[in-house]
Amino acid sequence: MTKPNILIMSTLRPFALDRLAEEFVVHRYDTANDKDALLQEVGADCRAVIINGKDTLGQAQLSQLPKLEIVACTSAGFEGLDHLALEKRGIALTNASLALKDEVADTAVMLTLSTLKELVRADRHVREGKWQREGHYPLLHTLTGKRAGIFGFGAIGAEIATRLQAMRMEIGYSSRRARELPYPYFPDVAALADWSDVLIVAVPGGAETRKVVDADVLARLGAHGVLINIARGSVVDEAALIDCLQSGDLGAAGLDVFENEPNPNPELTALPNVTLYPHHASGTVETRQAMTQLAVDNLIAHFMGKSLASQVKASPKPAEGVR
């Protein structure tokens, strides 16, 4: 049986390259010196692409992939891909949310705790001798009984809710649609922010969600409110976030993602009421391997005629009033 031709558009781990070579005729767009020439040469034969969602797969590439059947994304987000064009052509799209949901949820909890407990500032209080010179650190606030609003209730949002509920926080959510869940549903992020003490952003990036967490949403969280972002930096209006943190209209923020990576705004990084993490929520050996493995498994399943483990069923459409 002839092996299907596939295109590797992002760097993969060696184990994945070895496995793909067993099943497919592999073409390395990611390492090609002349990517356009490679596409012109092999694009017409390629039936699958494996790519990281931060990389680009747009009309320029898709027009040279007439036989494309499936795109397997090694990340949860896929804002670099023209997913609407894929959907229009009936091309299957899979992502890695199932493989990283636990790791990212753990990071959301870590940032929530670290921000509310002021871990970084308290650490400096000890290291710099302020405990001895100035006395005990100021009293903080408990998580117990606080309201955690989760904006985006996919696989990751659901895992965040499970963890925070176990910590005796009250859970609410806003998503594309209401679900049969034991948590209150809010039709838009502004209403969710009104209700929340902590707003956790877990929606996909892309044009549909760009800067949807704006000055109004941040102000609704209030002077004691906390923003946690483990989604994409583009979802939050970063200039408004800086203004609210500086003015005290927002209490604090815990951020894994930024508008400009890996060089975030120095006005933001200079603020004492932010806890920062370098877009590393899924950054463990085990999880990164599982993410890649899931993409490989989806490709193999497709060509074996089996169901896909993590297919993105439809283009992300915003809930009414959300985005």
Image (cartoon, rainbow, N blue to C red):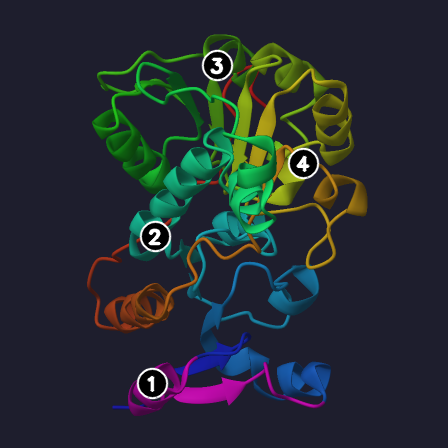
Q: Residue at x 35, y 43 (%)?
A: 105
Residue type at mark 4 is Pro
Residue type at mark 2 is Glu
Q: Earlier in the sequence, mark 3 or mark 4?
A: 3
- The quadrant where residue 323 appears: top right
Q: Which of marks 1 and 2 is nearer the N terminus?
A: 1
**Mark 3, secondary structure of its residue:** helix
Residue 299 lies, in percent from the top left, at: 33, 70
Q: Which of marks 1 and 3 is nearer the N terminus?
A: 1
Residue 76 lies, in percent from the top left, at: 44, 53
Query: Which residue position holds label 2?
Result: 103
Instruction: Look at the image and tell me in which quarter the N terminus lies.
Output: bottom left
Residue type at mark 3 is Leu
**Mark 2, secondary structure of its residue:** helix
**Mark 1, secondary structure of its residue:** helix
Camera-near label (3 vs 2) is 2
Residue 166 forms part of the magenta stretch? no
Q: Which of marks 1 and 4 is nearer the N terminus?
A: 1
Distance Cα–Cα, label 3 vs label 4: 26 Å
Tell me: 186 left or right of 33: left
The label on residue 272 is 4
Query: Which residue position holds label 1?
Result: 15
**Residue extending furthest toward the front:** 133
Residue type at mark 1 is Phe
Residue range in magenta is 13-33
Q: Give yes or no for contact between labels 1 and 2 (Cβ–Cβ under 8 Å).
A: no
Distance Cα–Cα, label 4 vs label 2: 26 Å
Query: Mark 4: few, some, or many residues within 10 Å (few <14, many ≥20)?
Result: some
